[in-house]
Image: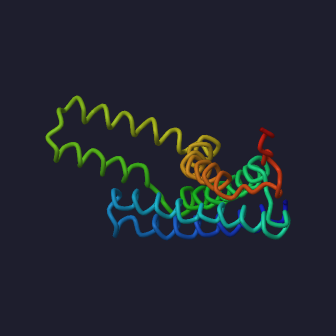
């Protein structure tokens, strides 16, 4: 189980980390709004490896059979490894290659509010909100925790769906004989 989890988790994490890094480094060329959609699309695509990892485990280790619980454990392991690589890539990017990211992103959000005709109070509230976000993101542990919860729900959902789809019991297990009349 460990080999499957590591293999598929590392592949999924490498995909999400590489594509997220590319997305963030090109954020000035692609709008922040489009970057958000692109980012979650990347996360969903990388989490498809959860399905393939569970299927690989079922077919290669389980001789074509796997319970929901075992499938869930494999999928959750792949998800956690993938999320940890995603977090590591973000931490490296944020603290080394994206100086002033939160200031730029905050300015973008304030500009959107201003263009939409928001009240000065609403704009000031958004400015204060981003000041708090910047404080939190400048703390590496808080930054890591907040970053981890971006892809994790997607991976958890993919794990649940894949576990339900791929579970297979042994032949004859769960099949009842009809009662004699």
The vertical placement of 141 against 38, above or below, is above
Horizontal placement of 110 versus 66: left or right?
left
Left or right placement of residue 47 versus residue 75 in this view: left
Q: Going 78% across and 63% down the picture, which residue do you hit?
A: 58
Q: Can you name the residue that lies furthest to the front here?
A: 181
Between 120 and 164, the one lying in front of the other is 164
**Residue 66 percent across, percent down from the top left:** 79, 56
Quarter-of-image position of residue 178 = top right
- Picture coordinates of residue 152 (x, y %)? 60, 49
Q: How is the image coloured?
A: rainbow
Disc count in the image? 0
Q: Quadrant of residue 117?
A: top left
- Rendered location of residue 113, percent (x, y): 22, 43
Instruction: Please give left or right for residue 18 compared with residue 41 in the image.
Output: right
**Position of residue 1 measured from the top left corner of the image (x, y, whole percent):** 84, 60
Q: Residue at x 41, y 38 (%)?
A: 131
**Depth check, front residue: 125 or 34:** 34
In the rendered image, which quarter is residue 74 located in? bottom right
Residue 9, placed above or below residue 175: below
Quadrant of the rendering where the C terminus is positioned: top right
Drawn side of residue 112 relative to residue 142, left or right: left
Instruction: Look at 46% across and 64% down and name the residue there.
Output: 24
Q: Nearer the viewer, residue 91 or 147?
A: 147
Of the pair 156 and 180, the residue shown nearer to us: 180
Residue at the (74%, 54%) spot, across then down = 71
Q: Residue furthest left?
A: 117
């Amino acid at each position: 189980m460990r080999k499957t989890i590591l293999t598929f988790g590392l592949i999924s994490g490498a995909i999400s980390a590489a594509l997220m890094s590319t997305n963030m480094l090109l954020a000035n060329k692609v709008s922040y709004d489009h970057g958000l959609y692109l980012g979650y699309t990347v996360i969903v695509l990388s989490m498809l490896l959860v399905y393939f990892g569970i299927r690989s485990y079922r077919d290669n280790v389980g001789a074509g059979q796997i319970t929901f619980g075992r499938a869930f454990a494999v999928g959750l392991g792949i998800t956690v490894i993938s999320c940890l690589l995603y977090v590591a890539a973000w931490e490296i990017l944020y603290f080394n290659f994206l100086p002033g990211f939160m200031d730029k992103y905050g300015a973008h959000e304030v500009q959107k509010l201003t263009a939409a005709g928001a009240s000065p109070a609403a704009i000031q509230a958004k400015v204060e909100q981003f000041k708090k976000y910047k404080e939190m993101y400048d703390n590496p542990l808080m930054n890591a925790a907040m970053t981890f919860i971006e892809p994790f729900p997607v991976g958890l959902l993919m794990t649940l769906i894949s576990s339900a789809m791929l579970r297979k019991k042994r032949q004859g297990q769960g099949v009842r004989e009809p009662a004699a009349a």
